[in-house]
Image: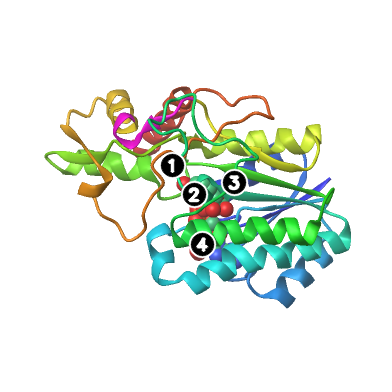
Amino acid sequence: MKVLILGANGMLGHDLIAVFNAAGYETIGADKPEIDIADKARIKDYIEQAKPDFVINAAAYTAVDDCEKNAELANLVNGTAVGFIAEACKEINATLVHISTDYIFDGHAAEGCTAAGGYKEDDSPNPINAYGKSKLLGEQELARIMGDGGKYYLVRTSWLYGKHGKNFVDTIISLGCSRPWLNVVNDQIGKPTYTADLAAAIKDLILSAPANGIYHLVNENAVSWYDFTLEIFGLLNIKTPVKPVSSSEFPRPAERPKCSILINNKRPHLRDHFDALKDCVRLLAVRAQ
Ligand SMILES: NC(=O)c1ccc[n+]([C@@H]2O[C@H](COP(=O)([O-])OP(=O)(O)OC[C@H]3O[C@@H](n4cnc5c(N)ncnc54)[C@H](OP(=O)(O)O)[C@@H]3O)[C@@H](O)[C@H]2O)c1
């Protein structure tokens, strides 16, 4: 079985390469500048030459705040280009696994945002920022090109962190070690997801070949960014005081959904996010030594 991973140099891409290599798949990785998914002729040609059985699209324009001022580029990379990839996959009868996000939802679900609340696979999207809109465009392009019963999996995930990329865990550790105190928002709630766990869950999805469609793959048990910070600092014994603040006290170019909890109703649940966090923090600590 041959697997092509697009966005192979990214945080999730790195772990996908490792997981599929370890599982004995013939694994090819591609990323820009060599392979730009927004270059229609190039990406179609590349996929059709490589002839993989599966294409996993982890390539995306992920700088959420920058997408506000570069909405056109975001729509091209996260939206239109997904259609280019889908067309090529359809041409060679490959299955496309496309990665999307909790940010396609508006975050108003489940007022009061309990751990049991959140978004199911078939809930209606309503993005509130340019990144979310561009990712929704990608979902729509995927469904439009592949059609009912087409060979695709749309995998939504949330709040990714891992060993190979700039992410919240890295950033908050470095801030915790350099600042006298921190403000962290406590009114955005989601499920932090470890890219190593997500990559393994994507491999399991492919292996078990369920019906095509939308899947939510996330580590379990939702927290706020504030709670998550306390968990990280607790594991590393960082004593820097952390003050919970509301999003309105922490303005950013892109509005974030308040309650972006994804509910996984269709696949075996990934482990509790805190167990995953412990593994990641242990690895980061070893790397820092
Ligand atoms: N990070 C999160 O919290 C999060 C949450 C939910 C869903 N997701 C989704 O999960 C997927 C993986 O995210 P990630 O955090 O691993 O992202 P990432 O670390 O930013 O990796 C994305 C990769 O795609 C590459 N890329 C960007 N534009 C490209 C283009 N036009 N052609 C080819 N490659 C291109 C990037 O290269 P450059 O770095 O050089 O631009 C990078 O190597 C994405 O679909 C993202 O939307 C992420």
Q: In the rendered structure, are the residues bearing label 2 and label 4 in contact, judged by CB atoms less than 8 Å apart? A: no
Identify the image quadrant of residue 241: top left
Is residue 18 shown above or below 74? Answer: above
The mark nearer the N terminus, 3 or 4, is 4
Q: Secondary structure at mark 4?
A: loop
Q: Which mark is residue 124?
A: 3
Q: Quadrant of the C terminus?
A: top left
Q: Residue furthest left?
A: 180
The mark nearer the N terminus, 1 or 2, is 2
Q: Is mark 4 within 8 Å of ligand 1?
A: yes
Mark 3: amino acid: Ser
Mark 4: amino acid: Tyr
The mark nearer the N terminus, 1 or 3, is 1
Percent of width and height locating residue 233: 27, 29
Mark 1: amino acid: His
Question: How far apart are the alpha carbons under marks 3 and 4?
Answer: 23 Å
Question: How far apart are the alpha carbons under marks 1 and 4?
Answer: 24 Å
Q: Nearer the viewer, residue 143 or 204?
A: 143
Q: Is mark 1 within 8 Å of ligand 1?
A: no
State which region is magenta. 221-227
Does residue 13 appear left or right of residue 131 in this picture?
right
Q: Is mark 2 within 8 Å of ligand 1?
A: yes
Q: Nearer the viewer, residue 5 or 134?
A: 134
Mark 2 neighbour density, 10 Å: few (under 14) some (14–19) many (20 or more): many
Q: Which mark is residue 61?
A: 4
Identify the image quadrant of residue 76: bottom right
Question: How far apart are the alpha carbons under marks 2 and 4?
Answer: 13 Å
Q: Which mark is residue 103?
A: 2
